[in-house]
Image: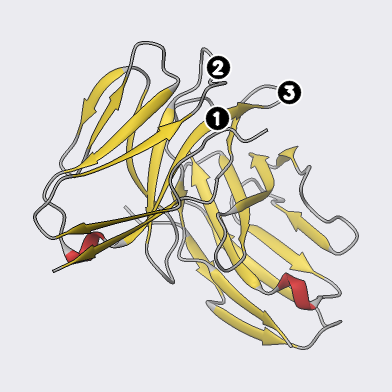
């Protein structure tokens, strides 16, 4: 079974530029998550989708971050304009559903460096 | 208010059993307890999950007392390759239904020869 796919794996941009990350979840998984992980910290949930609807985006900086999952399958996370403090790993994850006890599977992450 | 509390770091030697304890005093009735492992430059990897008593799989055991306010991840006979960060998570119920997982800072396990 294929895992969660993410691209690009690495990205370096200048501050105020924009960047987009793509994620393809495990086939059939209804729930998709984007986490931000800053070096030395645990992952922080940015946004959670159930099919193509947002169920939680309380920690997403909406002035610069946006995410969509238009057809309920793959997803894109965009940052515009980027700030230095956005340098982090962006992890996409998916699970079959979002009920308690469901296993969440993570991708390898997209590493962003803002200079 | 933190959902879980676990030691920041632990050291061990190859061949030893390692037990990492996590406290989750405010765990809700329908919460599960899940442990993830993360190596540098990789996404977190699911290790084990349980609701109560004991769960065992091919890599670890999870012990959960009756009050469920804590849990212990047990790694039998660790090797150098078990050096990683280990996260203990319990769920947060979403207002509109469903569940989400919030990570803490994790426990950095270092295994030496």
**Local crowd size for mark 3, using a 10 Å CA cut-off: few (<14), some (14–19), many (≥20):** few
Mark 3 or 2, which is nearer the eye?
Answer: 2
Please state which of residues B74 and B57 is positioned toward the viewer in this rendering.
B74
Under tag 2, what secondary structure?
loop
Place of residue A58 in the rendered image (x, y in percent of width and height, measured from the top left):
79, 42
Residue found at x 12% / y 60%: B14
- Residue wearing tag 3: B96
Number of labels in the image equals: 3
Is residue B77 visible to the viewer in this orientation of the structure?
A: yes
- Residue wearing tag 2: B28
Q: Where B8 falls versus A113 (above or below)?
A: above
Q: CA distance from mark 3 to mark 1?
A: 14 Å
Under tag 3, what secondary structure?
loop
Please state which of residues A65 and B79 is positioned toward the viewer in this rendering.
B79
Q: Quadrant of the N terminus of chain B?
A: top right
- Residue wearing tag 1: B91
User: In the rendered structure, are the residues bearing label 1 and label 2 in contact, judged by CB atoms less than 8 Å apart?
Assistant: yes
Under tag 1, what secondary structure?
strand
Q: Quadrant of the C terminus of chain B?
A: bottom left
Residue found at x 51% / y 53%: A25
Please state which of residues A73 and B82 is positioned toward the viewer in this rendering.
B82
């Amino acid at each position: 079974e294929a895992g969660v796919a993410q691209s690009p794996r690495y990205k370096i941009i200048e501050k105020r530029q924009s960047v987009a990350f793509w994620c393809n979840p495990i086939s059939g998984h209804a729930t998709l998550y984007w986490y931000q992980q800053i070096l030395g910290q645990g992952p922080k949930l940015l946004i959670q989708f159930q099919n193509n609807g947002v169920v939680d985006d309380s920690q997403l900086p909406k002035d610069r971050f946006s995410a969509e999952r238009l057809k309920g399958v793959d997803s894109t996370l965009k940052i515009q304009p980027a700030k230095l403090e956005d340098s982090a790993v962006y992890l996409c994850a998916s699970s079959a559903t979002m009920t308690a006890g469901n296993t969440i599977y993570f991708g390898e992450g997209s590493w962003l460096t803002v200079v | 208010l933190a959902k879980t509390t676990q030691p920041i770091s632990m050291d061990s030697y190859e061949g030893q059993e390692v037990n990492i304890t996590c406290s989750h005093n405010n765990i809700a009735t329908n919460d599960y307890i899940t442990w993830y492992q993360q190596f540098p430059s990789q996404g977190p990897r699911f290790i084990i999950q349980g609701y109560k008593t004991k769960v065992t799989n091919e890599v670890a055991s999870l012990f959960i007392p009756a009050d469920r306010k804590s849990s212990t991840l047990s790694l039998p006979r660790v090797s150098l390759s078990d050096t990683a960060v280990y996260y203990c998570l319990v769920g947060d119920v979403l207002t509109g239904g469903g569940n989400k997982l919030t990570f803490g800072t994790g426990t950095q396990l270092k295994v030496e020869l």
